[in-house]
Image: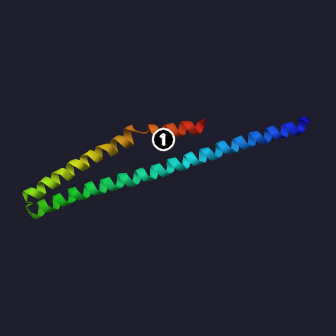
Amino acid sequence: MEVVADEETVEEEYDEGMMSHMINEELIDLIKYRSQRKWYSTISIIAIFAMILALMMLFVALGKDISEGWKEVLLVLIGAFVGSWSKVIDFWFNNAEQDNTLLESAND
């Protein structure tokens, strides 16, 4: 009888170990997915900001003059992208708490 009971406890421990392993794999997949999306958003913000700056330098080099209405729109766009740029910087260098929380929960 003891052998059967020992086998049942071993099977239960094995099932619990497999369940925690599956949960850890799901957490790792979630972290990978979020990291990939972070890269996409960062690259797109950098590309748009670079495009605005390149177009501004091109128009200045060609001597094109922009009307007052478009200058205001351009300044608003630049201000918006400077704000998003600061969010990207804060995100990559100051805000890794959520990933650390997920990693800590994977260790449990």
In the visual, does 107 lie left or right of 8?
Answer: left
Of residues 63 and 39, the one drawn nearer to the viewer in this rendering: 39
Of residues 7 and 63, the one drawn nearer to the viewer in this rendering: 7
Image location of residue 3, percent across then percent down: 89, 38
Compared with 11, 44 (above or below) is below
What SS does tag 1 mark?
helix
Image location of residue 5, percent across then percent down: 86, 37
Image location of residue 25, percent across then percent down: 60, 48
Q: Quadrant of the N terminus?
A: top right
In the visual, does 81 lie left or right of 94?
Answer: left
Q: Residue at left 16%, top 62%? A: 58
Image location of residue 105, percent across then percent down: 56, 37
Q: How many marks?
A: 1
Using a 10 Å C-alpha cutoff, classify the residue at mark 1 as few (fewer than 14 neighbours), some (14 to 19) or many (20 or more). Answer: some
Indicate the quadrant where residue 50 lies.
Answer: bottom left
Indicate the quadrant where residue 16 lies.
Answer: top right
On the image, numbered disc 1 is attached to which residue? 99
Q: Residue at left 23%, top 49%? A: 80
Q: Check the image and name the residue furthest to the right.
A: 1
In the visual, does 2 lie left or right of 34?
Answer: right
